[in-house]
Image (tube, rainbow, N blue to C red):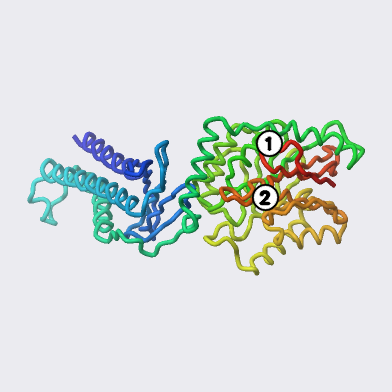
Amino acid sequence: MQRLARLVLVLIFASLVWDLTRPVKVPLPSGGELSVTVDPEWNGGRIFPNLGPGGEASWQAHRAPYNIEVGFVPDGDTKELPSAEEVKSGLIRWFWANLNHLLLAGIILVVWVFSESIPPTTIFDPSKKRPPLFRMASLGAAPVILAVVLGLVSAGTFKPGLNDSRYTGPLFKNPEEALASFLKFARAWENGEINLNLASRLRHFEGPLSTTVRPTIPEETIDFLIVSDLHDNPTGVAMTRDFARDLEVDAILDLGDFTSWGTPFEANELRERLADLSQPHLIVAGNHESTKAIEVMEGDPNVTFLDNETIEITGVSILGASDPAAMTSANSADPEAYVTACQTIKEQVATDQPDILMVHNPEIGKCAAEYAEENGLPLIFLWGHTNEPVVEERGSVLALSPGTSGTGGFEERKLPYGFGILKLNPATNALVMACYYLYEGVNDERPTFACD
C-alpha cells in the first residue's frame, strides 16, 4: 500500500510540474495565438509578452517567485497585432485554468490523505506517532500545498492593469507597418521568392581583384565572411546564407546587432534561417542584443559568442568583445564603460597577439588597434555599428567594416547590403585579400566594392 501511495503522489506532483512549465497555447480573436510559459524567478511576478516583430513588453502583474512569458504567434489569417486587452484576457484565461487545476489536485490529495491513511484522532494528538503512510503523504502534499498557496497569492495580487510597464520595439512608431513588413518578408520566404545566387556574382570580381591587390596568392586560402548589423533582415540573412554556403568560407564573423529589438523571436528566426550551414559562426553581441536573444542563438551548435575571449579557427587566432550595452535594456552604455572595455581589449591584444580583433562598436577596439599599429603588431581590426563601409591599411593594421548586412532590418533606410571577405595565407596567417561588397538589392548585378 505504501509503495502504491508513493507512486500516486509522485505521479500527481510530476503532472502538476509538467502542466505548469510546459507552453500552453491560447487562441486570440484577432488571429494567431499566445504561447504561455512559467519561468521561475525569486523576485518574479512580471508578465513578458513577446510580440515578435512588434517587440517585447513587460509589466508587474502579481506577486510570486515566477514570471509568465507570453509569445505572440501569428498565423496565415493574422491582420493586426493583438491589443493589450486581448493579451490580458488570454493571460487571465490561462491563469484561472492552471489555478483550478492546482486547487483540484490539492483537494483530491488532502481528502485522500485524511480519509484513507490515518485515524482522525492521530492528527491532533501530538503524543501519537504518525503512521509511515501519513508522514510520506505529508511530504508529498507539501509541494502541492505550496503551489496552491502561491497560486492563491498570485490570484489575490493579480492586477490586470499595465503596472510598472516596460517596452522595447517599434510599436510606438508605426505598429501597422511593422507587422505588415514582417508578414511580407515571412510569406515571401516561405513561398520561395527569396532565393538568391549572389556568390557567383561575387566570384566575378574576386579573381582579378586578388591578382591586382596582392599578386602573390597561395592555391589554398583561409576564407572568412564578414557580416554586421543584420537586424534580422530576411534578405540580408539569405545573402549571408548563400555567400557562406556557395563560397565555402571557413567561418562567418558576425560583428553584432543581429536583432533590431533584442527579442527571442528575432534570434529564433535567424537561427532557423541559417540552420543548414555547417561553418563556425562567431558573434560579438551588439547594442541591440539582449540576454534572451543571445541564449536563443547559442542553441545553434555552430554559434560561439565571444566576449573578451580568444579562440582559434583553422589556426587563425580571433579575439572578440561584445558591446557593453548588449546585456542592458538600453541601446547604449555609459561612455566610461566603452573606455574601460577598450583598455581591457588593449591588454588582451598585447598578451594574446591575435590575428583578428572583432568588435561591434569601434570605440571599444580603437585603442587596441592603435596599440598594435604603434608596436608594429599585425592585426586585422573588424567592426560594425556605424553602417559605414571601410577598408584600409593603417601601418601593420588592416581595418575593415562591411557597413550593414541588413540595411536597417524591417525599417526602410535605403542603405546597401554590405558584406566583407577576408583571405589569409594558411602557412603564415598573413593577409591575402580584404574587400567589402555593397549590394543595392537582390537584383544588383554589379555591386560597389573596395579592397586593400
Residue 410 appears at what percent x and percent y?
Answer: 56, 48
Is 73 on the left or on the right of 203, as rendered?
A: left
Decide if residue 270 is on the left or right side of residue 160.
right
Residue 35, which numbered label?
Answer: none
Q: Nearer the viewer, residue 46 or 426?
A: 46
State the count of labels: 2
Location of residue 261 with respect to 212 vertically, above or below: below
Label 2 packing within 10 angstroms: few (<14), some (14-19), many (20+): some
Tell me the residue that label 1 is attached to.
443
* Residue drawn at x 86%, y 31% as measured from the top left: 219
Determine crowd level at label 1: few under 14, some 14-19, many 20+ residues with C-alpha closer than 10 A: few
Q: Amino acid at mark 1?
A: Asn
| Callout 2 amino acid | Leu
Q: Secondary structure under badge 2? A: loop
Q: Determine the image quadrant of residue 350.
A: bottom right
Percent x, y for residue 193? Answer: 57, 32
As rendered, which of 406 and 423 lies closer to the eye?
406
Query: Which residue is at a point 64% across and 55% down the rendered structure image?
Result: 322
Residue under pointer 2: 415
